[in-house]
């Protein structure tokens, strides 16, 4: 009989048995494996969901940046413009972070919000130094697609991306 991998199948199979499950028995081990697998899959799914949200955040920021009234007539952007957009994106919480640092009394530990903002800033700086995958604004067709983008993750697949780093 094949080993059931999903928790639903294993619990269904175990529910058919009339006696209690022995802690060192085969069915108990199957149940343990299946529940650990479910937890691992759920954790990976959550991590992927967070990554998608972060990717959408940078794309939405780029869209807002190119939709500003002063930039509507520009058809393509340079790499330096894209670097400026990324640096502005990274610095978006600097004022709030500085306010949190100023409001904290000397000798007191940093608040949770301050630690989260600092960690996010460090992570984004790491992405930027390694090469951040952002929409390619040097292509006119891609700029038009980004301007027409409606905010869904499915619409991001039509965009071309390029890796931009501090040194490029």
Image (spheres, rainbow, N blue to C red):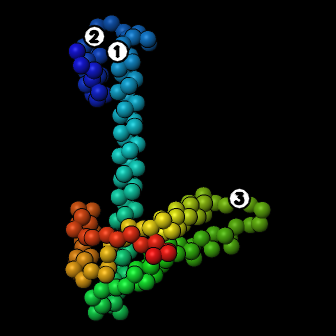
Determine which quarter of the picture holds residue 33. Answer: top left
Q: Secondary structure at mark 1?
A: helix
Query: Is residue 95 shown left or right of residue 2?
Result: right
- Residue tagged by mark 1? 27
Near-viewer residue (11 or 140)? 140
| First of labels 2, 1 by sequence position | 2
The residue under label 2 is: 17
x, y percent for residue 157: 24, 64
Q: How far is disc 2 from disc 1 in space, using C-alphas?
A: 10 Å
Residue behind mark 3? 109
| Quadrant hosting residue 161 | bottom left
Which one is in front in this view, the residue at disc 1 or the one at disc 3? 1
Residue 5 position in % (x across, y down): 29, 27
* Residue 11: numbered disc: none
Residue 35 location in percent, x, y?
Answer: 37, 29
Give the residue displayed 38% in from the left and 44% down from the top. 44
In contact (CB < 8 Å): disc 2 and disc 1: yes
- Dividing the picture into quadrants, the one containing residue 67 is bottom left
């Amino acid at each position: 009989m094949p080993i059931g991998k999903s928790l639903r199948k294993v619990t269904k199979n175990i529910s058919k048995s009339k006696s209690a499950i022995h802690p060192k028995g085969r069915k108990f081990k199957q149940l343990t494996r299946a529940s650990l697998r479910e937890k691992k899959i759920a954790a990976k799914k959550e991590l992927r969901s967070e990554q998608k949200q972060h990717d959408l955040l940078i794309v939405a920021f780029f869209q807002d940046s190119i939709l500003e009234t002063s930039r509507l007539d520009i058809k393509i952007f340079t790499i330096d413009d894209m670097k400026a957009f990324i640096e502005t994106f990274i610095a978006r919480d600097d004022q709030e972070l500085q306010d949190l640092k100023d409001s904290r009394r000397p000798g007191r530990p940093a608040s949770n919000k301050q630690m989260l903002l600092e960690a996010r800033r460090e992570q984004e700086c790491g992405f930027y130094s390694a090469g951040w995958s952002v929409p390619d604004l040097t292509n006119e067709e891609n700029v038009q697609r980004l301007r027409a983008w409606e905010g869904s993750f499915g619409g991001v697949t039509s965009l071309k991306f390029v890796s931009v780093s501090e040194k490029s």
